[in-house]
């Protein structure tokens, strides 16, 4: 089965090179494609946060991990399956991030906390609803906490 997706928007920001850390100060614009009506964003500014699904278009197929690896290649962290980590080198190269919506002007959303490089294709945007957030405490291993230490600085 083949699945064909068409980007609905593109990221505009100052980041390039698929760097792992220091995303906290990055402000991004998400510019909706001309083939969609501007009305597709009506009401979105009544939400504080959005979920952004994007495609790691600069990731290379040769680096794709299907099995297990050490996160970021750090041998001090356990070898875990690709679906137990959030790296870009995934089988389908999909990213998902929850962002803060700063503003909407016409076809452009300004957001904070989007860890996607400039010109990254956006596949979908969904508003964050409290009812879809976990209803119980979120837990994670210590290596993930260590890995994320500088991510949002």
Image (cartoon, rainbow, N blue to C red):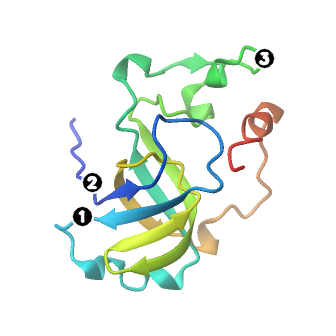
Single out the residue that lies furthest toward the left. Answer: 35
Which comes sooner in the sequence, label 1 or label 2?
2
Which comes sooner in the sequence, label 3 or label 1?
1
Give percent across and percent down for residue 28.
48, 60
Residue under label 2: 7
Check disc 1 and report its element: helix, strand or loop. loop
| Residue contact at pointers 1 and 2, CB within 8 angstroms | yes
Distance from the alpha carbon under mark 3 to that under mark 2: 37 Å
Q: Which mark is residue 33?
A: 1
Give percent across and percent down for residue 121.
33, 50
Quadrant of residue 60 in the image? top left
Quadrant of residue 16 in the image? top left
Single out the residue that lies furthest toward the top. Answer: 75
Distance from the alpha carbon under mark 1 to that under mark 2: 8 Å
Camera-near label (1 vs 2) is 1
Quadrant of residue 41 in the image? bottom left
Q: Nearer the viewer, residue 100 or 96?
A: 100
Which comes sooner in the sequence, label 3 or label 2?
2
Give percent across and percent down for residue 84.
62, 33
Single out the residue that lies furthest toward the front. Answer: 14
Look at 74% across and 42% down and name the residue there: 150
Q: Residues within 10 Å of mark 1 (few under 14, many from 20)?
A: some
Check disc 3 and report its element: helix, strand or loop. loop
Camera-near label (3 vs 1) is 1
| Residue contact at pointers 3 and 2, CB within 8 angstroms | no
Residue under label 3: 76
Locate residue 85 relative to residue 78 in the image: left or right: left
Locate residue 119 relative to residue 68 in the image: left or right: left
Look at 79% across and 46% down and name the residue there: 139
Q: Which mark is residue 85?
A: none
Give percent across and percent down for residue 37.
21, 77
Locate residue 84 relative to residue 118 in the image: left or right: right
């Amino acid at each position: 089965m083949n699945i064909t997706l068409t980007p609905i928007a593109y990221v505009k920001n100052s980041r390039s090179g698929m760097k792992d850390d220091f995303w906290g100060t990055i402000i991004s614009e998400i510019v909706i494609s001309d083939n969609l009506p501007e009305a597709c964003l009506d009401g979105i500014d009544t939400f504080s946060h959005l979920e952004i699904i994007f495609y790691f278009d600069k990731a290379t197929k040769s680096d794709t991990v299907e099995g297990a690896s050490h996160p970021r290649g750090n041998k001090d962290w356990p070898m875990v399956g690709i679906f137990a980590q959030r790296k870009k080198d995934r089988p389908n190269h999909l990213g998902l991030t929850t962002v803060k919506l700063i503003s909407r002007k016409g076809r452009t959303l300004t957001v904070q906390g989007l860890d996607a490089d400039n010109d990254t294709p956006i596949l979908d945007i969904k508003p964050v609803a409290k009812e879809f957030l976990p209803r119980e405490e979120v837990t994670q291993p210590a290596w993930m906490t260590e890995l994320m230490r500088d991510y949002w600085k």
